[in-house]
Image: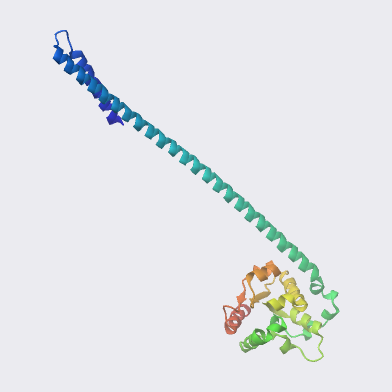
Amino acid sequence: MSLEQKKASDVTAKAIQIQTSITKTTTANTLKSKLSEISRKEQENAQVQKKISDLQKKKTDIQNKLLKENQNLAKAEATERKKLDALAKKQQKEEIEHQKKLKREIESIKASTQHITDATASPYLDVIAESEPEYDLFISHASEDKEDFVRPLAETLQGLGLKVWYDEFSMRVGDSLRRKIDSGLRNSRYGTVVLSADFIKKEWTNYELDALVAREMNGHKMILPIWHKITKTDVMNYSPNLADKIALNTSVSTIEEIAYKLADVILEK
C-alpha cells in the first residue's frame, strides 16, 4: 500500500507542477493542453486513492478475521482446559471411590474372617499344630474346574517337588471337610486362587478366599491368583482387591508355564 500512496503523491505533485506552470503568457492552445493533463492527473489520482481505499479495507478485513480467529482459538483453549479439569476431577473422584470401596471390602473381610484369625473362635482350629503337615501351596478352586485345569496343575506342581494341599491329595473318606480345609489353610505358605465363573458362585471358595485374605492382612504375601476363563471386568466386579494383583492367566499360559511360575515364587525363599 505504501507504493500506491507514493504514486498518489507523485500524481498530485505533477498536477500542482502543471498548475503552477500556467501564466498570463500561456497561449490558449497550451492552456487547453495543460488543463487536459491536469484533468487526467486528477482522474489518475482518484483511481489511485480508490485502490488505496480498497487495500485499506482488505487490510482491515484481514485484521478483523485474524482477531476473530484468535478469539475463537482462545475460547477453544479455555473450553479444552475446562474439559481437562473436569476429567481430572472425575478421575480423582473415581480413584477416591475406588479406595473407599477397597477399604470397605477389607473391613468386611476382616469382620467375616475373624473366626479364622482367632483360633479360639472355631472348634475346628483347636488342634495340635505339631501334628499337622505343612504345605507349600493351598489350591482354592471350584470343582467344575478340576478336570481341565486344577488336577493337571496340582500334579505338575507335585512333580516339581512342591507340597500341595489339593482336596483329592489331602482328604480321605471320613475326614471333616471344614477341619481339613482349616488345617490346610493355616499350614500353607501360599494359596493359589483359581478364579473362574464357577469359583465366584461357590460359598466354600469364598470361605477359603476369606481365610487367605485374613492371612495376608498379617503382612504375609499369600495369594497367588490365576484367572481361568474369566475377564478383568468379572474379577473387578467380584473383588477389586484381587483385580489389583498381578495374576497368571490360563488364556495366555499353559499349565506347565503356570506351574513353573508358581514354583519360582514359592521356592525363592
Q: How is the image coloured?
A: rainbow
Please determine whether, in this image, residue 244 is positioned above or below residue 184.
above
- The image shows residue 19 at horizontal and vertical percentages of 21, 15
Number of labelled discs? 0
Please determine whether, in this image, residue 260 is positioned above or below residue 47.
below
Please determine whether, in this image, residue 195 is positioned above or below residue 177.
above
The N terminus: image quadrant: top left
Answer with left or right where residue 14 lies relative to residue 65.
left
- The image shows residue 144 at horizontal and vertical percentages of 70, 83
In front: 158, or 21? 21
In front: 53, or 216? 53
In front: 80, or 161? 80
> Which of the 4 image quadrants contains residue 27?
top left
Answer with left or right where residue 220 lies relative to residue 130.
left
The C terminus: image quadrant: bottom right
> Which of the 4 image quadrants contains residue 209?
bottom right
- The image shows residue 29 at horizontal and vertical percentages of 14, 15
Give the residue at x 46% y 41%. 69
Answer with left or right where residue 67 lies relative to residue 260.
left
Give the residue at x 64% y 88%. 155
> Which of the 4 image quadrants contains residue 242?
bottom right
Please determine whether, in this image, residue 114 is positioned above or below residue 24.
below
Give the residue at x 69% y 58%. 97
Instruction: Give the residue furthest to the bottom.
Output: 173
Answer with left or right where residue 54 lies relative to residue 23.
right
Give the residue at x 24% y 20%. 39
